[in-house]
Image (spheres, helix red, strand yellow):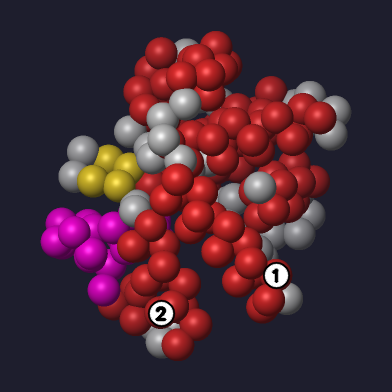
Amino acid sequence: MKLTRIRYRAGQAIRHLINQPDPAVDAALRELVPEEQWHLLARLAPADRVHLLTVHRELVRMNEQDPDLLRAALLHDVGKADEQGSVTLTHRILNVLLHTFAPSLPRRIARENGGWIAHGMYLTLQHPSLGAELVRLTGASERTCWLIEHHTDDTIRDDAHLNVLQMVDARE
């Protein structure tokens, strides 16, 4: 399991290093979400936008049709960026290392109004609830917001849509 997670994180790092804005990805996302939700997506790193579109497309390929699930797939990581900054590759690496070697440290470092590292760690840890609130403000359904808010919560086992979102999110 750890080796799989390391491979996934290494691939994610490479994608973040080489991924440049892709007009085709952005055009596809703009077709799938209303303008007020596109503005949330536009703040994200290009690799994050690719990830969101990939998760959505995989769910469609799996014949998932629930509109709340599909909307949550497109927006589940929007809390990783705000007016102050966004989660970068450095924050992601730091989060993985700290969770591995000093599990209590990420929460102690994270600060909403902290410096670059502290704020990035705050966004990393709080992105599900932050994203749910941002999406709620755009008029999304409560179900979509709930899926976003809980997409990293591994204690909920009895919601099929949440489980499939988590599964696809973890491998894409």
Q: Residue at x 54, y 35 (%)?
A: 50
Number of other residues with Cα within 10 Å of mark 2, as a class: few under 14, some 14 to 19, many 20 or more: some
* Nearer to us in this view, 119 or 94: 94
Q: Residue at x 49, y 34 (%)?
A: 49
Identify the mark at residue 163; answer none if there is no mark.
none
Q: Secondary structure at mark 1?
A: helix
Q: Residue 158 at x, y = what percent?
A: 78, 54
Residue to which mark 1 is pinned = 4
Is 33 positioned to the left or the right of 109 in the image? right
Is 170 positioned to the left or the right of 43 in the image? right
* Nearer to us in this view, 35 or 141: 35
Mark 1: which amino acid?
Thr
Above-or-below relation of 65 to 62: above
Mark 2: which amino acid?
Leu
Q: Residue 33 at x, y = what percent?
A: 52, 17
Query: Is 98 one of the magenta-colored residues?
Result: no
In the current view of this chain or complex, which residue is farthest to the front? 18
Tell me how many marks there are. 2
Above-or-below relation of 135 to 47: above
Is 85 positioned to the left or the right of 35 in the image? left
Residue 91: quarter of image: bottom left
Q: Secondary structure at mark 2?
A: helix
Is 28 positioned to the left or the right of 2 in the image? left
Residue to which mark 2 is pinned = 98
In three-dimensional space, the C-alpha distance between marks 1 and 2, rounded to whole angstroms, equals: 18 Å
Residue 96 visible? The answer is yes
The nearer-to-camera label among 1 and 2 is 1
Residue 102: quarter of image: bottom left
Magenta range is 109-126
- Give the dominant element type of the magenta stretch: helix, strand or loop: helix
Q: Residue 37 at x, y = what percent?
A: 43, 22
